[in-house]
Amino acid sequence: MSKENAQNPDNQHTPDQTPQLSLNDQMQRRLEERQHLLDAGINPYPCHFDVTSFSLDIIANFREEAKEPVAVAGRIMTIRKMGKASFFHIQDSKGKIQIYLKKDEVGDTAYDTFKLLDIGDIVGVKGYTFKTRTGEISVHAESFELLSKSLRPIPVPKEKEVDGEKVVFDAFSDREQRYRQRYVDLIVNPEVRQTFIKRSAVVSFMRQFFSSQGWLEVETPILQPIYGGAAARPFTTHHNALDMELYLRIANELYLKRLIVGGFDGVFEFAKDFRNEGIDRFHNPEFTQVELYVAYKDYNWMMELVEELFYRTALEVNKSEVTLFLGNEISLKPPFKRLSIIDAIEEYCGKNIRGKSEVELRNVAKDLGLELDPKISSGKIIDEIFGEFVEPKLIQPTFITDYPTEMSPLAKEHRSQPGIVERFELIVGGKEVCNSFSELNDPVVQRERLESQAKLRQRGDEEAMIVDEDFLRALEYGMPPCAGLGIGIDRMVMLITGQDSIRDVIFFPHMKPE
RNA sequence: GAGAAUAUAGCUCAGUCGGUAGAGCAUCUGCCUUUUAAGCAGAGGGUCGAAGGUUCGAGUCCUUCUAUUCUCACCA
């Protein structure tokens, strides 16, 4: 599999050749058992096994009168040896099923081999279905086969049913170990597996939803010579042959809009984006965002699309429009509340800031007890007030609309109100989950906006955007009116699956080296 | 970047006033042919996160470091 193995034909280590495994007594014993198996002519790592049935299907389709022949494979999770007969559970991709193994049925040699197996080993079993005296649907083994010997002890928790509720003892719960060794987490914590299955279902449903509208799924550069489309610091890398700096994308917005210029009616991309910023339970340095651009539409149309998308995704994945997120019961049933950012501040702070000057806004912030950086201007002040006093209170899905122009250099000026743009964010549980606007398509205005960003940058704002001449050239050819949308997939999955940390919806969250 | 908490057996955790390491599960040996947190009898397993220091003596007290978790800051 790996290059190291390919270069090392002698990877049939004997125990004393593998000091890198840092053996404890349990691993030592398992290595010895592996050797015993090899000595007995049993390959502990054969090539294939023909599976005919899966655990939960066997249980679902069980009929008392029929002994169905089955071949199942999976990892041994429990063993109960009772002298000349044994019970064990194997776990496959769908769940667990009990196996019953009797010495006088499989033979002495096979039974002795079975006694060398451990919790964690992967086996294939052929036999027939039956129900035990205590009523558990099981497989009566006629033969079994070791498919992979496990060398490390697996922290399998003990489970007990109390009044139909499953009680778990000594669960593998150390977060650090769970994230660093996600494979172990997935083996022993079934709810973790379910979360990631749901994540996959969310993405496939969205993909199907977008595709069925006739929009095109596309791929755009991750390595970008000029990064843009968001306000964030990038990761920088270097291309050797070209001897040039490249940036890992912080967004793909500007590339997708080039494709709208190119004549597609709708394009979307599920994109890994990278932002060189802090890590906490809502932020991972690489995260997934879907961006969607649809020609001839505006942000009002997009709000309706987002309502439908969230609602239908919840129904599809959870069979319910209700979800528990950050301790709150959330309903994703449309319509979602809509509030302009100015109205939201009035509603939650009792302050009318409509038409206020920068000095007046500063006084409002002061009244509310907010310390402000003296350098920031009106738009940022409004954003600060909103972020501090309003956003955390928006628990049920709420569209916040009509942001100050200076905070949104890629959005189109509002059709009837000066100084603000046609933009919305969807806030759920006090957190932003998506961002959208009627896209700015006037190349002259866009150039002015980017140039004023460049000035902010010169004054030390590291997150201000860079002038992207090729993007402006594309707009100069003419981009139709267009609605754009970005949804943070990780946060959306947190919402749908009820997880309170982004690390619980990303298989391998970023960790410092061990 | 700041603060708080945590780090002891494969897993989950105790460990008192500083006196030389404990439990349950897992593992090993023996018994047990429908068990299910199987049971019964016995056994092994520890660089107490790392490095210094105080002390006759440190899992325990002090200092530094590392990682994780939470909160804040930064940030969507």
Image (cartoon, coloured by chain):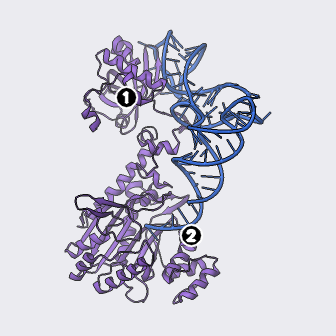
Chain colours: A purple, B blue
For label 1, the residue is A64
Badge 1 crowding class, 10 Å Cα cut-off, few under 14, some 14 to 19, many 20 or more, is few
- Under mark 2, the amino acid is Lys
In this rendering, the answer to whether A77 lies above or below A223 is above
Chain name for mark 1: A
| Labelled disc at residue A199 | none
Q: Which of B59 and A150 is in front in this view?
A: B59
A231 vs A270, nearest the viewer: A231
Residue name at image x 42 percent, y 49 percent: A195
* Precedes in sequence: disc 2 or disc 1: 1
Residue A116 image point, x, y percent: 40, 19
A313 up-or-down from A165: above or below = below
Q: Determine the residue positioned at 51% across, 55% down.
A: A500
- Residue A117 seen in the figure: no
- Left or right of B61: which side holds A446? left
**Chain of the residue under the numbered disc 2 shown in the image:** A
